[in-house]
Image (cartoon, helix red, strand yellow):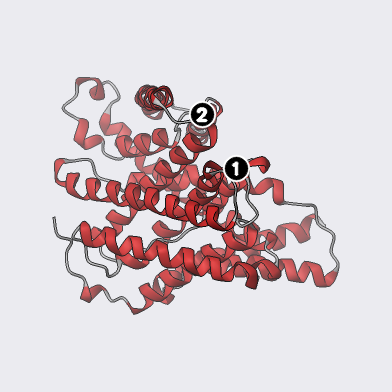
Amino acid sequence: MTNTVLIVFCSLILIAYLFDLTSSKTKIPSVILLFFLGWIVSRFVELTGIHLPDFSFILPVIGTLGLILIVLEGSFELELNKSKFVIISKSFVGALLPMIAAAFIFAYMFQYFDQVPLRYNLINAIPFCVISSAVAVTSVRHITANYREFIIYESSFSDILGVIFFTIVSQNETFNLYSLGHFGLQIVIMFIISFVATIVLSFLLSKIQHHIKFIPIILLVILIYSISKVYHLPSLIFILLFGMIIGNLDEFKNLKWIHKLKPEILDKEVQRFKELVIEASFLVRALFFLLFGYLMETSEILNPGTLMWSLVIVLIIFFLRTIQLKLSKLPLTPLLFVAPRGLITILLFLSIEPVQRIPLVNNSLIIQVIVLTSLFMMIGLMIFRDGDIIKPQT
């Protein structure tokens, strides 16, 4: 049995790697193929009568690890300098405003058909409003650097802002000056923690001489994230800032304290650390989407009762995205197509307390919206050609 498990596990991960290798050629997002592969495995297990344990409890754990590693991987590619101010500001606004607009539109739609408190509708609406960096970043490696950079910023901000927005709404019965002040204090505390933790982790990266040094750093990153989450702090801010700072050490060489970290040595160690994070990110991401596909039921994918809802939600998502890109003076192609839902949507949905859930939002609706937005992205990237690109207006 042990050998069988190892053979199946290694085979599935190697197939996932093949999907990753060919995605830039086929333009098919690997997430779609991983969903499908996981679903095929579940049907095979069902037909053969093989008894396997319930893996559903593992999904949030793997998803959280994937979110940390994916945001960290994406943050390494972001440049911190004055020339990036325009793209950072546009991506931040592009992540925030459509998210808030979509959340309230969906919440009022749900309330019209299901008479429950607006707050509960808003909690259930937010998962549909977050662009998944896990899907977006890995699907745009072949497009021009300017657009890829915008998508990395936008999807990373979307993940962070989505988690913050969800936390605020789900944990506050009322909204007043006290709750806003409390939230502002949490942001300040998280920035302080991020700054101190980044210095400590950078020091460890440059000073540890033991042959095992990167796994403890990753574990410390996960530990800081998890402890921050226990205290309801916006912990993804730490992941983003840590990756951006150690990935842009050249921008901080004028600061005296940076020289104490021996930047020449640290640069080499950071490069090796990035490589490990990228490899680990691929493994965890593949496991998550394979497992999610495995846990999907055919009836949930093809559920006609939620199909109309999912189509309306997807249409609103891309209508708002069109307005956002027009207002930001960014071309629609290819950016319009890259607004997939995925890992963060699933994690937020699983985080909704049972008492806060509404009947309209269920597994079928979540799965259909994820699949439809990914298919729309796939079609858009298939018809998109790099030669057709016009540089973003600044």
Q: Is residue 320 left or right of residue 355?
A: left
Q: Earlier in the sequence, mark 1 or mark 2?
A: 2
Instruction: Where is residue 326? Give x, y as percent.
Output: 22, 62
Please name whichever residue, 287 or 268, is drawn nearer the observer in this view of the structure: 287
Give neighbour class at mark 2: few <14, some 14-19, many 20+ (Cα, 10 Å).
Answer: some
**Residue depicted at 34% across the width and 79% down the height:** 383
> Residue 363's quadrant in the figure?
bottom right
Q: Which residue is under mark 2?
A: 232
Q: Which residue is under mark 1?
A: 351
Q: Is residue 142 above or below residue 210?
A: below
Quadrant where the C terminus lies? Answer: bottom left
Q: Secondary structure at mark 2?
A: loop
Please, what is the three-letter code of the amino acid marked with disc 2? Answer: His
Give neighbour class at mark 1: few <14, some 14-19, many 20+ (Cα, 10 Å).
Answer: some
**Residue depicted at 80% across the width and 68% down the height:** 46
Please, what is the three-letter code of the amino acid marked with disc 1? Answer: Ser
> Residue 380's quadrant in the figure?
bottom left
Q: Secondary structure at mark 1?
A: helix
Please name whichever residue, 90 or 49, is drawn nearer the observer in this view of the structure: 90
Quadrant where the N terminus lies? Answer: bottom right
Instruction: Where is residue 57? Give x, y as percent.
Output: 70, 46
* Label 1 with label 2: CB-CB less than 8 Å: no
